[in-house]
Every structure is written in C-alpha cells, then in structure tokens.
Amino acid sequence: MSARILDGKALAQKIQQELAAKIPNLQAVKGRSPGLAVLMVGDNPASAAYVRNKERACAKVGITSFGQHFPTEATQAQLERAIKECNQDDHIDGILVQLPLPSHLDSVALLNQIDPDKDADGLHPMNLGRLVRGEPGLRSCTPAGVMKLLEAYEIDVAGKQAVVVGRSILVGKPLALMLTAANATVTVAHSRSRDLPSITRSADLLVAAIGKPHMIAADMVKPGAVVVDVGINRVVDAAGKARLVGDMAFDSVAEVAGSITPVPGGIGPLTVAMLLHNTVLSYERSDTFFD
Ligand code: NAP
C-alpha cells in the first residue's frame, strides 16, 4: 500500500478530548452540563448500536444523555410531543432522531419539528438553508466530519477538482456545498451519471457516499488523489464472518491514491465527534441564537 492513511478515529478522539477539556469551564458559568436527547424508535440492532455508541461518547466528554426509546408502534403524535418537550427543555441543547424510522412514521415531518438551534444533526431545512447561504449554523455531522479531516491533514481543496459520488441530503448534497464553500470545483455524481469512471478519474479529491461495498475500483481513481470513503456496508465473508467495509475497494485503491480513509476508523467516528461538537456549540450559544 502506498497511500497515506487519514486516521479519522484518532482525530475524533482528539476532538472529543478538546470538548471534554472545554466543558467544565462552560459548566461553571452556565450551572449545568450540556445535554443531548437521542430519540430512537423500535429495535433495529444497527440503530441501537449507533445510539449506544453516541451515548457512550457523550458520557466520555461530559454531555448528559436524555435518550428516549419508543416501541416500534409509537405514533407520529407521540414523537412530535417528545420533540416539543425536548425543544422546551432548557437542559437539552441537541436533539437527534435516530434514522431510519419505522415506515409508518414521517421522518422528514419530525425532523422539521426540531428547534433549528438544537438540531444536532444539522438536517433541519433552516440549517441546510444556512449552509446554502454560507451563514453560521449547525452543519450536518458526516459532511462536517469530512471537512474536519481535510482541515486536520492540511489538505487544501481550493481550486481542486472534487467529485462526490452520492447526492443524499444526509451526505452528498451538504458535502458538495461545503466543498464549494472551500473553493473546490465540485462535481456530484449519482446512479444516473454516465461513464462514472471517467468522472471519478478527474478527481483530485474523490468522496464516495454510495452504500455499495467496494464499488469504486482502483482504475476509477486518479493516481495520487485524496480518497474519502463515507460508505459503511456490512458484508459477510467466505468464512461467514460479518464485517464493515466501505464503498472503495480499499486494498487496490490504496495502491493508487495519495491519501485514503479506512473503514472502519475513518469518517464514522468523526460523525459522532461532530454530533458532540454541534451539541456543545448549541450549549455555548444557548443564551443567544444563530441569527
Ligand atoms: P443514500 O441516501 O442511499 O444515497 C446513496 C447515493 O449513492 C445516492 O445519491 C445514489 O444515487 C448514489 N448511488 C447509488 N448507486 C450508485 C451507483 N451505482 N453509481 C453512482 N451513484 C450511486 O445513502 P447515504 O445516506 O448518503 O449513505 C451513503 C453511504 O454512507 C452508506 O453506506 C451509509 O451507510 C454511509 N454513511 C456513513 C456515515 C458515517 O458516519 N460514516 C454517515 C451516513 C451515511 P441516486 O440519488 O441517483 O439514487
């Protein structure tokens, strides 16, 4: 392997240590610790693991968790009520609805109920609008984690060709906006893009947020490119053992790329770190507002 590894896990630990060091001083002034409410519905094991992970990370840095776990059959009205209570609770700075929700619930309608200044996931239309306008606000965690990693490794994207494969509201679209704000020339590719390999080969910075294991092969990558793998896919190997892999064919892409993020240990831990960062940002600003 010739590529440099961009170590998201180590950076996430550093961000969490910085938050842990900063919270006691703020707490002395505010008279309370920061609070994050994670609302989960049903028993999806992957979601339960993500929620546990977030609550553990909160405990480590000094954020109080106000988790609420609803049964699968919880109603839209119950969830709306819970969000309203969190919006009004002065001990809660960040609110997150763990996705995906059971299909009878309207997740977009629920996300829209969250107070934009407590929107720890940065997915409320107000915060997405602030991102479009280049105004301060809460940024969605995964793309913010990608930008943090680039910054930490002093990878300047200004004037560079960036290709983001994936156009979801969760990752691809907000990341394209953040890269544009950092003066990259951005192309967003998706399932209807023609001749994807020729698009990805033009990238100085290639980001995959697709959800297809090993889809980006070495011959789709420009030699020396910075490669960021957002994908998290569970695969079962020949021995029947489950493991997580990204959207890049890691071993072969790492022979061509200049820098690469691993999966796991890349963008995943940074997403959690940025969630904590957003919660603390709302806590710091809890007596003021973003606009
Ligand atoms: P998503 O909503 O399913 O979006 C996937 C995107 O990939 C879509 O825009 C889709 O195009 C595009 N796509 C699918 N097949 C393609 C193909 N053959 N060629 C080109 N583009 C293709 O997924 P997401 O929520 O953005 O998540 C993407 C991946 O990132 C998943 O593996 C997810 O688990 C992972 N993820 C990781 C983190 C983290 O913390 N690291 C956070 C969030 C998500 P269309 O729009 O045309 O359908």
Image (cartoon, rainbow, N blue to C red):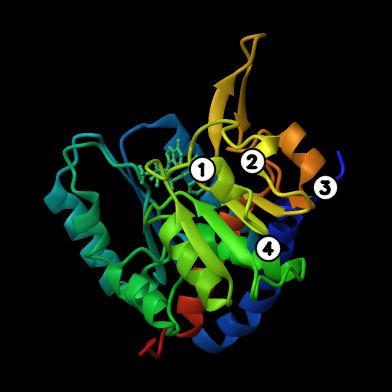
Q: Residues within 10 Å of mark 4 (few under 14, many from 20)?
A: many
Mark 3 vs 2, N-terminal side:
3
Question: What kind of element bears circle 1?
Answer: helix
Task: Name the foreground residue: 81 vs 159.
Answer: 159
Task: Name the foreground residue: 215 vs 268.
Answer: 215
* Closer mark to the observer between disc 3 and disc 4: 3
Number of dots carrying numbers:
4
Mark 2 vs 1, N-terminal side:
1
Per the rendering, the mark at residue 149 is 4
Give the amino acid at mark 2: Met
Which residue has dot 3 on it?
3
The CA distance from mark 3 to mark 2 is 15 Å
C-beta proximity under 8 Å, tags 2 and 1 = yes
Which residue has dot 1 on it?
196
Mark 2 vs 4, N-terminal side:
4
Q: Residue at x 57, y 41 (%)?
A: 197
The CA distance from mark 2 to mark 1 is 8 Å
Q: Is residue 101 above or below residue 23?
A: above
Q: In the rendered view, does 264 fall on the left or right side of 128?
A: right
Task: Name the foreground residue: 229 vs 61.
Answer: 229
The CA distance from mark 1 to mark 3 is 22 Å
The CA distance from mark 2 to mark 4 is 23 Å
Question: What kind of element bears circle 3?
Answer: loop
Give the amino acid at mark 4: Leu
Per the rendering, the mark at residue 49 is none
